[in-house]
Image (cartoon, coloured by chain):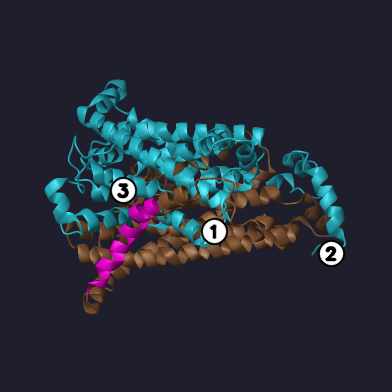
Amino acid sequence: MATRQTGAKKIRVLPGFKLTLGYTLLYLSLIVLIPLAAAFVKTSTLSWTQFSHDVFSPQAMASYRLSFGASLLAALVNAVFGLIVAWVLVRYNFFGKKIVDALVDLPFALPTAVAGITLATIYAENGWIGRFFSSSGDWHLYFHLPAIKISFTRLGVFVALTFIGLPFIVRTVQPVLEDFDSEIEEAAASLGANRWQAFWRIIFPTVTPALLTGFALAFARALGEYGSVVFISSNIPMKTQITPLLIMTKLEEFDYAGATALAVVMLVISFVLLLAVNLLQWWASRYNTSNLS
Amino acid sequence: MVGEPLQHEQFIMTSAATTLPIRSRFVHHRSTNEPPLVRRLLIAVALTFIALFLVIPLVSVFAQAFAKGLHFYFQSIRDPLALSAVKLTLIAAGISVPLNCIFGICAAWAIAKFDFRGKNILLTLVDLPFSVSPVISGLIYVLIFGAQGWFGSWFSDNMKIIFAVPGIVLATIFVTFPFIARELIPLMQAQGRTEEEAARVLGASGWQTFRRVTLPNIKWGLLYGVILCNARAMGEFGAVSVVSGHIRGQTNTIPLHVEILYNEYNFTGAFAVASLLTFLALITLALKTWVEYRNTELSGTAFAPLPVGKKAG
């Protein structure tokens, strides 16, 4: 590699560099870059008052609050339970482990519309899970608990976003736990650390960069999610309307300028998140090589 | 925490230990394992979480689909509108998967086998569609090809794109754009270019080198990418929903057909058609697990589980 970069740089043994790179750039531009640029160009034709009217309207602000709040909460819950799932899958043996491991990817493989109608149905008041939280549920009669409605509320939005985000945490944390050296733990134990100390002071710091990456990925995915949320949310403006749905509503009203203004705000946020994920992965790789290998 | 002098010893011990399966290294040592009670509790918490969010939804799809019996189930699936939705979904996936496959191979060849400036920027740009909301993925094509769009007037005279089949295909290509490329790039980077260079020196043509040397090396990674790309192409809802005209029998894909049935309160019909997509998801997971297994058997390297991925470069 070193000689190639310095001495023999001009001589390329392998053919097809210009062809493949040219095709890559052409295809990338036609499918991704030019269409995305269209959104920014369209927004630049708006006046500032028009833009701020669309972007800071009370309805838009309420949708940001819901989208950000529910995505953050879902990513947090996934960070906790995803870490436990990854831990259990790497460290313990139990019946059906292989199936559980394969099933973790279900939210990637299951189309979002199917996830949406399914979650809406089982978390509805008469659904398989929702009935335990509704006022007619047995638990509520015995323990006088307040009834909780899940489907068609903000809680439903949170449930859908949790479903969507689960694999991100598990699949980023799992390889780090698998690569973890048991010798380090043994060293900690022989130096007198108890199990909790070994986890908290040794294992957890090693997993942290991966956990943060997974968290950021789950959060970013949840922000843009549409298919699974529209079915489980009642989609009432100011209450249960997420930002992607607000964009959809504006499109259906043929308010292309308003929809594009909101889209640009979302795009900028996702690009910032993408940058954050890249920085986290860079940090994680540095962390791993300096500490583990 | 680990002192500097330990590093070397530790390295030797690690390389010896890696020949053992990971599991046996943890299970038998008391010092590196939790008390049984904690272990069982953690397993219980993990399984409850998986059951609530994954298993119960999965089972309920089929329970709902067969709620009115087998006859109604097959009637819902054999409905002409459902069949036309299946056909359109197959067309969209049939065009977008091969196109993204060609792109993925080209991008991976250029990025993995050659050095050039701006490689990292190119890698980030390839990943871009993953971070774009599906609704926005559809919207950008409406802005270009819609009635008020850049090329809208030209295309509305000659060929309809938005609210028609080409728009659906374009949106599907966009959302599945990175899938195959991001599997192949890290794989081909890890394999290096010495084998291809040897083939060239021994007199193979460029095409022969690719077909006889590169392709056998990347076939499992390629298959893995195609499986995931196909699952997303057939299941995409948000982006396709924006560009589809929602005309029954003409511009409805399977997920859009599910939505229409559900919104008409034909729940059993919606779940019957949704069960087709659920079968697809289960087949995808099974194939994916099988390819992962085959690949680790053969080479010991792991794939990037999507869309998390190990960043190449």
Q: Which residue is mark 3?
A: B171
Residue B127 rendering spot, x and y as whole percentages? 46, 54
The residue under the point 43% across, 64% down is A271
Q: Amino acid at mark 2?
A: Glu
Percent of width and height locating residue A293: 75, 55
Name the outermost residue toward the top: B71
Give the chain letter at badge 2: B
Q: Give the percent coordinates (x, y) of residue A79.
A: 55, 56
Residue contact at pointers 3 and 1, CB within 8 angstroms: no
Which is nearer the eye, A226 or B163? B163
Badge 3 element: helix
Instruction: Name the residue tied to disc 2.
Output: B4
Report which residue position mark 1 lands on.
Answer: B116
User: For the residues carrying marks 1 and 2, which lies nearer the camera in this image?
Assistant: 1
Crowding near the residue tagged with mark 3, few <14, some 14–19, many ≥20 C-alpha atoms within 10 Å:
many
Instruction: Please indicate whether residue A89 sits to the left or right of residue B10 in the image.
Output: left
* Mark-to-mark CA distance, 3 and 1: 30 Å
Chain whose colour in the figure is brown: A
Query: In the image shown, does A143 or A99 lie closer to the viewer?
Result: A99
Respond whether the residues carrying marks 1 and 2 are from the same subunit.
Answer: yes
Q: Is residue B279 above or below residue A88?
A: above
User: Dot 2: what SS?
Assistant: loop
Q: Amino acid at mark 1?
A: Phe
Please say if B2 is above or below A150. Answer: below
Quarter occupied by residue B65: top left
Please report the residue visible at 28 percent of the width from the left and 71 percent of the height from the top. Answer: A55
At label 2, counting other C-alpha atoms closer than 10 Å, the crowd grade (few under 14, some 14-19, many 20 or more) is few
Same chain for mark 3 and mark 2? The answer is: yes
